[in-house]
Amino acid sequence: GLGIEVGMEEGFVKVVSPIEDTPAFRAGLKPGDFIIKIDDTSVKGMTLNDAVKRMRGKPKTTIRLTILRKGEPKPFEVTLTRDIIRVQSVKSKLIEPGYGWVRVAQFQEHTGENLVKHVEGLYKNGPLKGLILDLRNDPGGLLNGAVGISSAFLPRGVVVVSTDGRTEDAKRKFIAAPEDYLRGNREDYLKNLPAAVKTVPMVVLVNGGSASASEIVAGALQDHKRATVLGTPTFGKGSVQTILPLGNNTAIKLTTARYYTPSGRSIQAKGITPDVLIEDPTSPPTGRLRESDLEKHLLNDQEREAQSEKSQRTSAKPSTDAEEKPPAPLEFASEKDFQFQQALKFLKGMPLTTAQSTPPAPTKN
């Protein structure tokens, strides 16, 4: 595959999030990019499934995508080589003595265990004064993974997320406890975490590519005032799907409930609003696709009468005169990563380069 989460808007395929260290990420695709042609075929009129099937293929085969990006005068082409997608779900580094960075790229089966190993590695260098949890461009994944990551930083027994739907079995609370983040007879991986992890000042980095499970984590840490959320509003994927078997190797997937943060906020269509808004200068300000931009999206039940936001994009028809312009991807946690640098400044109590005049102080428990 190519390694992108995509949606559909006004007949075109729109990038929700490129997955890190995949062909799409290395080619420089960004959240909010429109894919208007696959090889020489226009995607206008295709279903999302048809477009995805065309983009998939055998490893080592190439594909040309024509991209329309907000702020660029013309569409441009990128050539990608398909590959087997293997996602390293957790990365970390010691930024400087006393300050650590942990990135969760996707919530997989063993993401919780991997996070513990990375955090333990950071603490081997000495106690931390601040920690950045980076959930940008994280499209989500397993719910129990989100509960486990949240539980690593929250007091035991507090609510992480709840679901609510029309039936009683859709109403449930998930708490920071092994029974809600472990599967099977696995050993509790959080018991090896340094105790200081529960109180170290934290910033959670999010953007419009942060969806589903990553929004659950950001919302839980924000509601419990365990961390300050910094970045741009998240995607808004707060619905629960249930697969019902129909027999004869067929099934139907139904939306059966919504996710709610511990304080009762619905994530659906609205997402998580950061405590400190820091724009990403490398991304078009209006080009990101969010759940509320998708046609016939599930409404946030707390704002049913609100008009869903319409993403702004150029009114001109996409030109078929595309030029070759492979954009360079941003290296997270680098000197050029503006949002990351502001997060580090925030933990140090330094002034931020942002329109917000008086950001709150780092949270300390």
Image: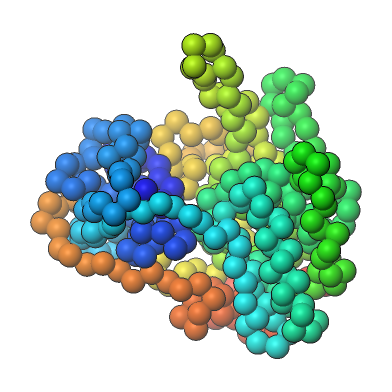
How was the colour assigned to the protein in this rendering?
Answer: rainbow
- Total marks shown come to 0
Residue 4 in picture, x, y percent from top left: 41, 51
Q: Compared with residue 218, is residue 329 higher up or lower down, i.e. above or below?
A: below
Of all residues shown, which one is farthest toward the bottom? 97
Residue occupying image coordinates x 52% and y 19%: 251
Residue 308 in picture, x, y percent from top left: 48, 40
Residue 303 in picture, x, y percent from top left: 60, 37
In this orientation, does residue 346 appear?
no
> Is 324 in front, or is 362?
324
322 left or right of 307? Answer: left
Of all residues shown, which one is farthest toward the top? 247
> Is 360 in front, or is 214?
214
Q: Quadrant of the C terminus?
A: bottom right
Residue 260 in picture, x, y percent from top left: 70, 41
Residue occupying image coordinates x 71% and y 66%: 117
Q: Compared with residue 66, is residue 227 higher up or lower down, i.e. above or below?
A: below
163 left or right of 282? Answer: right
In this orientation, does residue 145 appear?
yes
Quarter-of-image position of residue 167: top right
Q: Compared with residue 308, is residue 329 higher up or lower down, i.e. above or below?
A: below
Residue occupying image coordinates x 45% and y 31%: 296
Of all residues shown, which one is farthest toward the left? 321
Quarter-of-image position of residue 323: bottom left
Residue occupying image coordinates x 72% and y 26%: 170
